[in-house]
Amino acid sequence: MNSTKNYDIKDITLAEAGRRRIEWASREMPVVKLIRERFAKEEPLSGIRISACLHITSETANLALALKEGGANVILCASNPLSTQDDVAAALVEYGMPTNAIKGEDEETYYKHINTALDQEPQLTVDDGADLVTTLHTKRSNLIGNVIGGTEETTTGVIRLRSLAKAGGLKYPIIAVNDAQTKYLFDNRYGTGQSTIDGITRATNILWAGKKVVICGYGWCGHGIAMRAKGLGAQVIITEVEPVRALEAVMDSFQVMPLIEAVKIGDVFITIAGNKNVIDKAHLQVMKDGAILANSGHFNVEINIPALESLSSNKQQVRPFVEGYNLKDGRRLYLLGEGRLINLAAAEGHPANVMDMSFANQALCLEHMVKNRGKLETKVYPVPEEIDKQVARLKLDSMDISIDTLTPGQEKYLNSWQEGT
Ligand SMILES: NC(=O)c1ccc[n+]([C@@H]2O[C@H](COP(=O)([O-])OP(=O)(O)OC[C@H]3O[C@@H](n4cnc5c(N)ncnc54)[C@H](O)[C@@H]3O)[C@@H](O)[C@H]2O)c1
């Protein structure tokens, strides 16, 4: 990267294609559009420096444009080495937002890009997985004094930041956008559900009907993937460590068993647990020949890839995003997208319509942080309930759907204890 440039992308000539893609996504993001129009009038983020570490996709571009209209100076970097849409990155640069992201970048470049985003000395951070905030709290802690607050997009990031806060290390307030109902009930469930199936289908072109699909983790994302795989005719098996979620999976009509049993019969394995070595060496050692392995959890640690390498004599690229590992005992296992989140690696991530709600929460939470500058404690906050409700109301409005309201009598009843049978 040229030292005078604060962006690093694959190819600026892709900008026109990226712009068209961003405009296409905007048609499906009416709530962000409304916020963008209001921000343009009110400029609630006037002069605020925002460093955003997000998947560089057309939906993220629409959020970034809304923040820019709100008066912010936005610099972006990728939250995953494989999730960048290079044409969108180019368009963002042309829109005047320095972007540091190249699809397929190595780990060194990934962190170099995070550091470039931090070089603008952010007052607000937007993170997806907490790599930017972690870098800010460790190697770049001299910059923390400028920061008003930050937001975190995903489950894994929220878990990391809550651990940091618990250890007494968090240095500024964060809003856990992931935990808004208008985020996880839709983005994690319907977004990850559809796009994970999309990513695996694009990478492999498998027929889902009749396949035994093992889903490791029955959280909100796992619910969505299981629902969609079932809809395509797959026989879904769930593995879990939490008894309540396992029970829910049983009553949702899925088979539940330990992974060590499931590996003997599964055709496709999808990790979505937000945990490490969910598929471990012991599982790989007995996994059915020809099985396909994909991950949709945030980090590429859910499948023990070093163990897979150690069990293999060699590997071949079979198709884009599909590597065939030839095991020393003669079996073959297929790993998709290097174990990185497959919906973004091999497809386009969540549809814009669902990111509309996640990113509406992001924009409104950033505005909230600026409005309440200096008044917030150093902790991980939930999304304010009024923001969550507002996003739901605006989304319903955009769909032309109205709902009932409580009568005064009902409101009184719900707030009292006197009336029984
Ligand atoms: N691919 C995407 O676009 C995308 C979108 C949203 C979230 N995510 C990521 O997906 C992951 C899951 O998110 P979520 O919101 O569903 O989380 P969640 O906390 O609701 O669910 C995770 C589930 O996995 C279970 N689990 C943990 N360890 C396990 C193990 N060893 N075996 C089986 N189950 C195990 C937990 O008990 C829990 O029920 C996170 O890393 C999150 O950041 C990815």
Image (tube, rainbow, N blue to C red):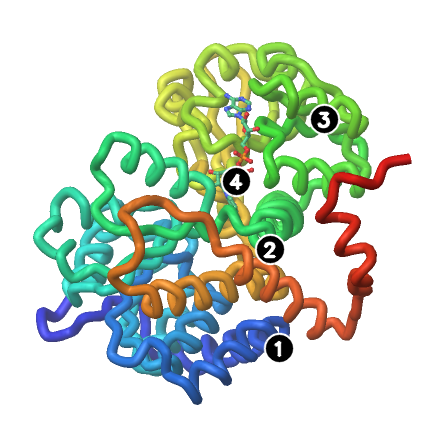
Tell me where residue 397 appears, x and y as whole percent.
71, 73
Which residue type does callout 2 highlight? Thr
Residue, disc 3: 249
Tell me where residue 398 appears, x and y as whole percent.
69, 74
Of 141 and 303, which appears nearest the observer? 141
- Local packing at callout 4 (Cα closer than 10 Å; few below 14, some 14-19, many 20+) is many
Chain-order first, disc 2 or disc 1: 1
Asked if the residue at label 1 sits under 8 Å from ligand 1, the reply is: no
Residue, disc 4: 296
Chain-order first, disc 1 or disc 3: 1
Q: Secondary structure at mark 1?
A: loop
- Frontmost of labels 4 and 3 is 3
Of 119 and 40, which appears nearest the observer? 40
Chain-order first, disc 4 or disc 3: 3
| The disc label shown at residue 202, or none | none
- Measure how far apart labels 2 and 1 are at the Cα level: 19 Å
- Measure how far apart labels 3 and 2 are at the Cα level: 22 Å
Which residue type does callout 1 highlight? Arg
- Frontmost of labels 2 and 1 is 2
Residue, disc 2: 182
Q: Secondary structure at mark 3?
A: helix
| The disc label shown at residue 27, or none | 1
Quadrant of the rendered image containing residue 41:
bottom left
